[in-house]
Image: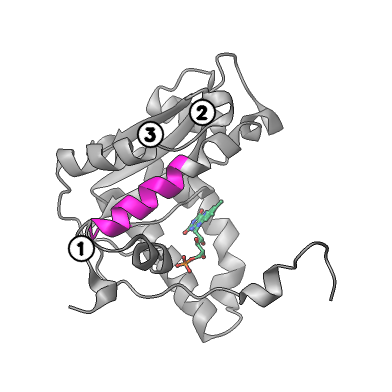
Amino acid sequence: MSELQVDSESASLETVMYSSRAMRRLEPTAVSESLLLKLIDAANQAPSGSNAQQTRWIVVRDPDQKKKLADLNRLHGAPYIQAEVDQPRDAKHKRLVDAVVWQMDHLHEAPALIVACYDYDEPVSGSAVYRKAGSVWPGIQNLLLMARSLGLGAAPTTLALRDQAMVRAALDLPETFAALCMIPVGYPSGRFGPVTRKPVKTIMRFDRWSE
Ligand SMILES: Cc1cc2nc3c(=O)[nH]c(=O)nc-3n(C[C@H](O)[C@H](O)[C@H](O)COP(=O)(O)O)c2cc1C
């Protein structure tokens, strides 16, 4: 087993971080409840603004509930991805688009769809839905890293959540909740590997921005 194929928490944080790819192709094999709880526990260690701890997690395993989310993902995702299906930019982009389409076709079969929400304690709509998103994403990243370290595939997604009223209806969410991310989780069909990112010299400068 290469270093990148680790499936235990003994993997170094660096290995986990540098190989936490979006894994969209998942096996339908069930993921144990104890592992799912471990993911949420890791997510729950993340910081939040004013330590408000208002992130809420719905772990969707029920087939009918998963189908509702899969239908929402297709409703919003299919029109979004169609232009890219018709004209992928290059071979790498085509692989990404193929994986997104595969995920769309198989989402209801994923063992768990984890929805990360923020509870505003008051009804929210429009752009207010994203006001406290910064307090939810550190937990999402913790969850993704823990999934990777446990050998589970996961990917952050947002397309299914474009209409908050529809997500609230599907999951019986109070109107004070905003659903910000859906993370399908399961054992990966493919292999883990390094992520590809722009070089640091492209994306940072010391002291001020200069070419
Ligand atoms: C805010 C956000 C929204 C995303 N929404 C989606 C989505 O709706 N569907 C999807 O398949 N992937 C989604 N992704 C995953 C990205 O496409 C993925 O992280 C990116 O292509 C890098 O992939 P890699 O880590 O495998 O290199 C989202 C990621 C982020 C951070």
Q: CA distance from mark 2 to mark 3?
A: 13 Å
Q: Is residue 67 visible?
A: no
The residue to which callout 2 is attached is 118
Label 3 vs label 1: CA separation?
Answer: 21 Å
Amino acid bearing label 3: Asn
Tell me what residue is drawn at x 62 percent, y 30 percent.
129
Q: Residue at x 59, y 58 (%)?
A: 80
Q: Amino acid at mark 1?
A: Asp
Residue located at (38% from left, 32% from top): 57
Q: Is residue 150 magenta?
A: yes
Report whether 150 appears left or right of 13.
left
Residue appearing at x 61%, y 31% in the figure: 132
Give SS at disc 1: loop
Question: Among all residues in the image, which is located at the extreme top?
Answer: 122
Residue linked to disc 1: 7
Q: Main secondary structure of the magenta part?
A: helix
Mark number, residue 22: none
Residue 106 appears in which quarter of the rendering? bottom left
Query: Farthest residue in the front direction?
Result: 207
Which residue is most to the bottom?
Answer: 91
Kindly state the secondary structure of the residue where label 2 is placed. strand
Sequence-wise, which precedes: disc 2 or disc 3? 3
The mark nearer the N terminus, 2 or 1, is 1
> Contact (CB < 8 A) between labels 2 and 3?
no
Q: In the rendering, which numbered label is found on residue 44? A: 3
Does 75 sit left or right of 13 as displayed?
Answer: right
